[in-house]
C-alpha cells in the first residue's frame, strides 16, 4: 500500500515525500481512510507506530484548499510534544499553503499571538496555554472543523482532564473528533463516552503493549552503585542513549555528574526554560550530546531517530511509564534496546513489568548485587561462583527479553 492509495491530495503527498516516507505504517493505513471519510476515530498504537502522521495527514488534507483561519486544533500534554508535532505537520503542509502554530507555556504569550496573526490554520497546543489564549480572545474556535486529542493517557496522568473538558465545551458542535494514544486506561473512557460516543476504533497491538522490536534487559544493582554502573555502561556505548530518572533534582544532579566524568551528556527536565529544553533536544538530535538524562514528562516529546538504548536509571513507577519510556527506541519497525537498573526496593515494580513481558525470555532479578560491569563484591554466602566475564560484565545478573 502507498500513501497515494489512501486518497490524499497531491500537495499533501508532496509533503509526505519531502518527509522521506515511502509506505504507510499499519496505524496510518488503517486510520487515514476512515478519517478522510469523516469518521470520528480512536487510534491506539504503540509509541513509534506513526500516530502523528495518522491524524496529521488527513487533517491537512481536509483543510487544504479551504478558507484561511483556525480550523484544526491538536491538544498535546507537553511543550516538547507540541513542538515535535508542529514540526512534523509543517513538513507535511509545506506544499499545501497551510500555517501551523504552537501554544505552550514558558514562552511570552505575545510571541504566540503575533504568530497567530501572521497566519493560522492549525494550532498545536498544551491545554493550559490554549485556554489562556481563548480567554484573551487571541484565537477563536468559531470555524474549527477537526480536533485531535493526542496522548490521552498522558493527559490523564498529568491531571489535564478538567482542562480538556473545558476546551471541548467551547468547541463548535459540528466538528470531527479524533483521539490518539499509545495506551488507553479505563479512566479515559469517560471522556470518550462524553465526546466520542460513536467513534470507530483502530487498535494496533493490544492495550498497554510494548513494541516487539525492543529487547528488554534488567540488571540488579544496589542503589548507591547505580551511577558508577551507568558510567561504565555509557563508556561502552557509541550511539545515542536516553536515560530516565524519576525526579527533576536527580535528573540535573546525574547530568552534571556524567559531564564531570567526561561523558557527552546533558539533562532535560521541567525546571529548565522552554528555550533551554529546545536547545538540549537539538544537541541530542544532532549528535552533539549523545547521552540525554531526562524525566519522563520532559522526554514526552522526544522524537529522535536512532536512539539505540533507553536506560531506566530509576525504575518507572507504573507499567505504562515503562512502556512509554522504552518506546523511545525501536521506533517505526527498527530494533531497539531497553535496559533497567533495578535496586532491591524496586523489585515489586520490576515484577509488574516482568508480568507484562510474559512469553519473552525474562529471568528474575536478584534482591541485591553488582551492577552492569561492577566489580565483584563479597556478599553473604559468597558470590555463588558467579564471577566476571572477559568483557567485565557480571555473570548471572542480567535478564534479556526479545
Image (cartoon, helix red, strand yellow):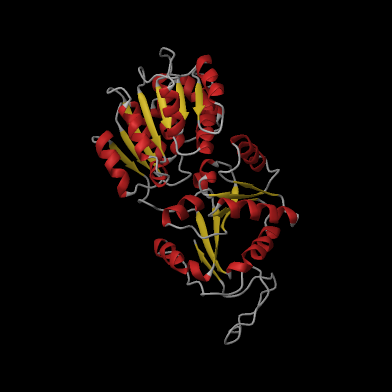
**Who is closer to the viewer here, 32 or 171?**
171
Taking the view exactly as shown, the residue that stands out farthest to the front is: 136
* Up/down of 176 relative to 119, above or below: below
Q: Where is residue 193 in the image (x, y as percent from the top left)?
A: 25, 39
Quarter of the rendering containing residue 160: top left
Q: Where is residue 57 in the image (x, y as percent from the top left)?
A: 44, 28
* Up/down of 142 relative to 315, above or below: above
Horizontally, residue 195 falls left or right of residue 1, namely left
Residue displayed at 48% across by 57% down: 316
Taking the view exactly as shown, the residue that stands out farthest to the top is: 67
Residue displayed at 56% across by 55% down: 245
* Up/down of 358 relative to 166, above or below: below
**Who is closer to the viewer here, 257 or 281?**
257
Q: Tell me, yes or no, if residue 2 can be seen here.
A: no
Query: Number of marks in the image?
Result: 0
Q: Position of residue 319 (x, y in %)?
A: 42, 57
Quarter of the rendering containing residue 257: bottom right
Quarter of the rendering containing residue 258: bottom right
**Who is closer to the viewer here, 78 or 37?**
78
Horizontally, residue 288 falls left or right of residue 10, namely right
Q: Tell me, yes or no, if residue 65 can be seen here.
A: yes
Q: Where is residue 254 in the image (x, y as percent from the top left)?
A: 64, 55
Q: Give the quadrant of the N terminus.
A: top left
**Who is closer to the viewer here, 77 or 264?**
77
Amino acid at each position: 500500500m502507498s500513501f497515494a492509495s489512501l486518497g490524499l491530495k497531491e500537495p499533501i503527498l508532496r509533503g509526505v515525500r519531502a518527509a522521506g516516507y515511502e509506505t504507510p505504517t499499519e496505524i496510518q493505513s488503517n486510520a487515514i481512510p476512515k478519517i478522510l471519510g469523516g469518521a470520528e476515530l480512536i487510534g491506539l498504537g504503540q509509541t513509534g507506530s506513526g500516530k502523528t502522521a495518522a491524524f496529521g495527514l488527513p487533517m491537512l488534507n481536509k483543510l487544504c484548499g479551504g478558507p484561511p483561519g483556525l480550523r484544526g486544533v491538536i491538544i498535546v500534554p507537553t511543550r516538547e510534544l507540541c513542538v515535535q508535532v508542529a514540526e512534523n505537520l509543517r513538513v507535511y503542509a509545506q506544499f499545501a499553503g497551510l500555517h501551523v502554530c504552537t501554544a505552550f507555556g514558558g514562552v511570552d504569550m505575545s510571541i504566540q499571538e503575533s504568530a497567530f496573526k501572521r497566519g493560522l490554520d492549525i494550532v498545536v497546543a498544551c491545554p493550559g496555554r490554549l485556554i489562556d489564549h481563548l480567554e484573551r480572545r487571541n484565537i477563536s474556535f468559531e470555524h474549527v472543523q477537526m480536533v485531535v486529542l493526542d496522548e490521552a493517557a498522558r493527559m490523564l496522568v498529568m491531571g489535564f482532564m478538567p482542562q480538556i473538558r473545558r476546551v471541548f465545551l467551547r468547541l463548535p458542535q459540528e466538528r470531527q473528533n479524533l483521539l490518539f494514544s499509545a495506551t488507553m486506561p479505563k479512566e479515559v473512557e469517560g471522556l470518550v463516552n462524553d465526546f466520542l460516543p460513536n467513534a470507530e476504533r483502530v487498535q494496533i497491538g493490544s492495550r498497554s503493549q510494548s513494541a516487539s522490536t525492543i529487547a528488554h534487559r534488567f540488571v540488579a544493582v544496589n542503589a548507591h552503585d547505580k551511577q558508577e554502573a551507568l558510567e561504565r555502561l555509557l563508556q561502552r556505548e557509541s550511539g545515542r542513549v536516553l536515560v530516565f530518572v524519576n525526579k527533576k533534582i536527580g535528573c540535573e544532579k546525574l547530568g552534571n555528574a556524567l559531564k564531570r566524568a567526561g561523558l557527552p551528556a546533558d539533562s532535560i527536565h521541567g525546571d529548565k526554560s522552554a528555550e533551554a529544553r529546545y536547545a538540549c533536544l537539538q544537541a541530542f538530535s544532532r549528535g552533539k550530546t549523545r547521552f540525554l538524562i531526562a524525566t519522563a514528562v520532559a522526554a514526552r516529546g522526544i522524537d529522535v531517530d536512532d536512539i539505540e538504548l533507553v536506560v531506566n536509571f530509576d525504575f518507572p513507577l507504573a507499567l505504562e511509564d515503562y512502556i512509554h519510556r522504552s518506546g523511545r527506541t525501536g521506533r517505526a519497525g527498527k530494533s531497539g534496546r531497553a535496559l533497567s537498573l533495578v535496586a532491591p526496593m524496586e523489585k515489586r515494580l520490576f515484577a509488574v513489568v516482568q508480568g507484562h513481558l510474559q512469553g519473552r525470555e525474562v529471568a528474575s532479578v536478584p534482591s541485591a548485587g553488582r551492577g552492569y560491569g561492577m566489580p565483584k563484591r563479597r556478599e553473604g554466602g559468597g558470590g555463588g561462583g558467579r564471577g566476571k566475564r572477559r568483557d567485565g560484565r557480571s555473570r548471572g545478573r542480567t535478564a534479556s527479553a526479545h
